[in-house]
Amino acid sequence: MNAHDEDRIKQVLKRSLPQVEDEAEPVRDLWPAMLRRLDASSVAPSLSLVPWFDWALLAGLAGLAAFFPASIPVLLYYL
Amino acid sequence: MNTHPYLRAYLAGIFVPTFVLPLLLTFVVVRLVFQVPIPVEQALIFPMACVPLLWGLWNMLWLWSSPRTHMPIGLHGAVLPLLLMPMGALLATSAGLLEIGARGVTWFHACQVPYALIVPLFLAALAGYYLVWKYVVGFVNRALGIA
């Protein structure tokens, strides 16, 4: 590929790509939306997303531990 | 973060049992300080040696099998007590930590568990494992990039 070919490719590329305006700034600040999206994709689940069934299981476990404390060391033995 | 996924799965699996171990060691301190006649050291063999290993291997198994079975990690973890509880009971019986009586079993020479409570205890273990695997192990898996 010689210099002539490179110039030709540059011109073809310039013609095919849309022109970028001089004032290419977004109309609003995009960073807060980016932060919200990062928070939404966080690995930590939100408490509001925990289904009622899991809360019921947790309450059952807490109830068993409260009414039958001898079960606590037995359950800890398996953890 | 795309290398050694099974090593990361093992580390994520042993996360919870290794957190519980210091809690169990407080029982040793209580025993030594207050001279409580409970064989805590023998009771620690299973939680220290077997449980973390099995949790790590179980999480590796989930990583290997989940693309085929699509089983949620909570349900996968809830199956583990079916394996762990007989093993733990067998080890506890052979170590003299679990005595089988006429009305129930006695754990650690101190905790009397009537036979009527064994089924609720087993279901509680399933529920506890389901919750811990779903929320804690699942979170660590996501944090380590394997889920």
Image: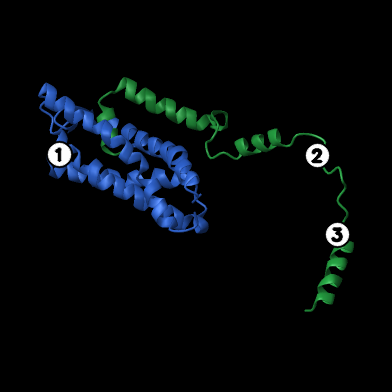
Query: Color of chain B here?
Result: blue
Rendered image: mark on residue B42:
1
In the rendered image, residues at marks 3 and 2 fall on the same chain: yes
Per the image, label 3 sits on a secondary structure element best described as loop
Q: Amino acid at mark 2?
A: Pro
Which chain contains the residue that carries disc 3? A
Q: Is residue B99 visible?
A: no
Q: Residue B86: x and y, percent?
A: 26, 45
The colour scheme is: by chain
Q: On the image, numbered disc 2 is attached to which residue?
A: A26
Q: Are dots 3 and 2 in contact, CB under 8 Å?
A: no
Q: Amino acid at mark 3?
A: Leu
Residue at left 68%, top 38%?
A34
Mark pair 3, 2: CA separation: 20 Å
Which chain contains the residue that carries disc 2? A
Mark pair 1, 2: CA separation: 67 Å
Tell me which chain appears green: A
- Above-or-below relation of B135 to A14: above
In the rendered image, residues at marks 1 and 2 fall on the same chain: no
Q: Nearer the viewer, mark 1 or mark 3?
A: 3
| Label 2, residues with CA under 10 Å away: few <14, some 14-19, many ≥20 | few
Which numbered disc, 3 or 2, marks the residue that appears first in the sequence? 3
Q: Is residue A60 visible?
A: yes
| Label 3, residues with CA under 10 Å away: few <14, some 14-19, many ≥20 | few
Rendered image: mark on residue A17:
3
